[in-house]
Amino acid sequence: CAEQLSSLERSNILRFIGDMCVSKISSHRLLAVELIGEILTTGWFWKDHEKTAQLAAWMFTPFSIFGEKASNEADDAEPSTPSSILLSALQGRLADKSPTVRARAAMSLSQVVKKASLAKEENRNLDGTIIAYTPSKLNEDSSKVPSRALTDGLCKIGTSLVEALRKRASTDEKATVRKASIVAWLQMLSLAHRENKEEFIVSGLDISALCQLCNDSSVATRKAAADALTKLVKANYENEEYTSQASSLELAWAHTVLPLVSDAEITCVTKAVEFFSELVLDPIMELGRDAADKLTDDGSTRYFVALRILSKLSEGSKEAGGSRNGTGSLQTALQKSFVIAGSNCKSLVKNLLRAVYHVGAISLGLDRRSSLDSTLSHDEYLESDLFEMNTASMRAGAWCLLDALTCTLVQSSDGKSSLPNVSLSQAVRSSQVDLSFLTLSFQKLRALTNSDDVPSDKKPSLTSTSRACLMVIARMGNFVPHYDAETCYNDILKDLESFTMPVELISSAVGALVTLTKRLLEDSNTEMYIECEAWATRLLAHCEQTIDSCFSSIANRGLIARGDNKLLSRALYFVGELSMIGFSSQEDSSCLSKKKINDITPTDKDPVRGLLIQPSKRLIHLVKLMLPSSIPLPNPNATENAFVPTPSSIRAHAFVALGKFCLRNEALAKENLNIIARELDQDSNTDPAVMSNCLMVMGDMCVRYTNLVDKFLVNMAGCLQAGEKKLIDVNSKSNLSITSDGSIPLHMV
């Protein structure tokens, strides 16, 4: 009805609404912010606005601190307008003492920004009518178009408005206000992106605040923050240039939105899975057999975004640790997506496996074609530089996804598939991919890692991808062609025996060896347990000889060289992994032997469950020699050279190796628990890396030998409560967990 009134009467109404904004009665202020939101998107206001833009003094009443501020500004400042005063009034109500008013102010701002953006995109007026201007006339008089004028007004106060909304979303005590502020905040950041306004475009502060809000106590707030991050990531689809801001958004999404798939609230889980499908799963599924062509099309950004997010998960997998983050969240998201797919689960898994196969092959420049799939080809641009940013992201992302996919499909420890409708073998058969690409990929990664032509800063990424490749081979090695399996088996064995394989790969390599052994023995009468026990025992003896020889060299030189440090660290980690072959939490060390135990059945995940690989007494003695802060030299020539300081990295690996020995030998655990526990003493000046590993060893002992560790719980609790930053950092980044889940039973402390 206001449209039927005269301009003077409408100005009086606006003046009255302004008075309501500072009323002592909250319901008056609430009505005022609602009306301001409606008025800013009506046609009559902007007609009056054009006439009175230079005569806004009628708005400068005692109620309006914004008007008073504007009237006192410098003479060269832009004159205040009715729209700017109303927008500032809305911004001011974000700090209202009433949470209802604060929430309503944020909602009104969100409504205003949304309507202005939609009207501009659709070339319409705010009331929905089509703009009658010709394109040339529109450019000349764009400031007279209400949607354009409103957008300009929002942009003028954009910086302060974004700061106010960010503060309100981050600190407000009411969840409804936080949620409403997030929605309005997102609208303003989206506006800045569309209008290319550097002043208030999404910043590190915005991303950090949204990450914190993804862990908010309110379900609605968590969902709103996750939605905001998802939309901000998608907003970069149109950008050809990959900016640091886009990288930060993808990293934030990977480590704060994706973990919500494990949220306690089911609606939050559903939302997170929906975002995952929308941002990651669907684009990769679209690639399919035409991956090479689609990755070079103009609209390829969405595919690279999906793969870059996966690569961020791969890069952060060591820091993540638990199922709430990193690759654990990816596995959970895949499993829930498959469950939601229902009867379409088999088709989903088949197409996903095909897409990952093509992307993984392209990212390594493999030119071998499957007899079942002659369409595999590679674009010269993609193969020209294997370390170009997008290609490297494709490689890391594809292998991260394949690792999570195979882990989701493999049988659990009880022999049952995690998905009732599909198994790994069914997926491999239906996808009809040539799995020789697994061994070919490992050969290519191995060659690149060992090549002197590859820059050293690129090798950590290759190592991470190699680890994922070996983990996939450990699950899918049964399906690799016999010749390729034998070649890969020999390559892994050669690298392990020569100790050229990095520590990060040893655990995955041992698992791959076990699976490849099973594949090579399919047409043989040799029992798998006997064959695995044979090469594992041989490798243990080789490690023992290497450590002994290294000790002799150290004695002759009187110091531990850098090469000795690397060699001993790898040998120690290797013997620990060999001793864990066949480990099961259900086993009884008093009943184990080198033969298969009838009551411990193998699974696809661990085909040699129940097998015991026993280290010799000499090897245990050598490992224990590296536990103290100084290594005693064998047959020292002089008294002053009787001991050599032990590097912390060697000590840390030695404690882990001893812990793994103890997990399979209760008598050994009884003998050495005191040695491990004393490193947790806060007054011992123990290196944080050593203390961290000892804490993990004791944590796993709590699960394995609860009655033996009870008396050391005080030491563990004191170590955890100390809260030393270095120890916390090492614990969060360590990948030396000695059990399958690597968890420390905090509930026991």
Image (cartoon, rainbow, N blue to C red):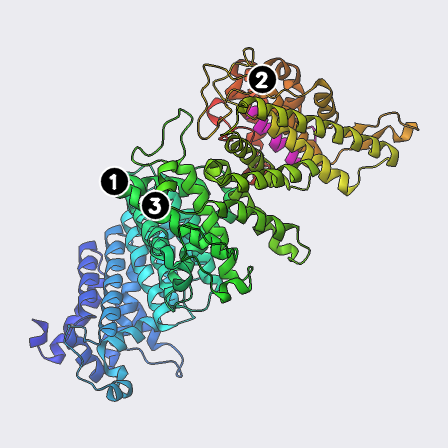
Choose between 280 and 476: the one closer to the eye. Answer: 476
Q: Residues within 10 Å of mark 1 (few under 14, many from 20)?
A: few
Please name the residue shown 76% across and 42% down the image: 563
The spot of residue 335 in percent (x, y) is 34, 39
Residue 690 forms part of the magenta stretch: yes
Residue at point 62%, 13% (across, down)? 667
The picture places residue 359, in percent across and down from the top left corner, at 44, 54
Instruction: Please tell me which of labels 3 and 2 falls first in the chain.
Output: 3
Name the amino acid type tagged 3. Answer: Lys
How crowded is the residue under tag 3: few (<14 C-alpha within 10 Å), some, or many (20+)? many
Residue for badge 2:
594
**Which is closer to the viewer, label 2 or label 1?**
2
Which residue is tagged 3? 350
- In this view of the protein, which residue sits in the foreground, 153 or 525? 525
What residue range appears in magenta? Answer: 684-699
Residue lying furthest right in this view?
638
Check whether the beta carbons of the residues at disc 1 and disc 3 lie within 8 A of each other.
no
* Residue 622 picture quarter: top right
**Residue 282 horizontal side relative to residue 379, left or right:** left
Sequence-wise first label, 2 or 1: 1
Residue 607, how many percent across, how many down? 48, 27
515 vs 65: above or below: above
Kindly report the secondary structure that dominates the magenta region of the rendered protein.
Answer: helix
What residue is rendered at 36% in x and 80% in y?
78
| CA separation in Å, label 2 and label 1 | 43 Å
When asked about the image quadrant of residue 717, the answer is top right
Secondary structure of the residue carrying tag 3 is helix
Residue at the spot of label 1: 342
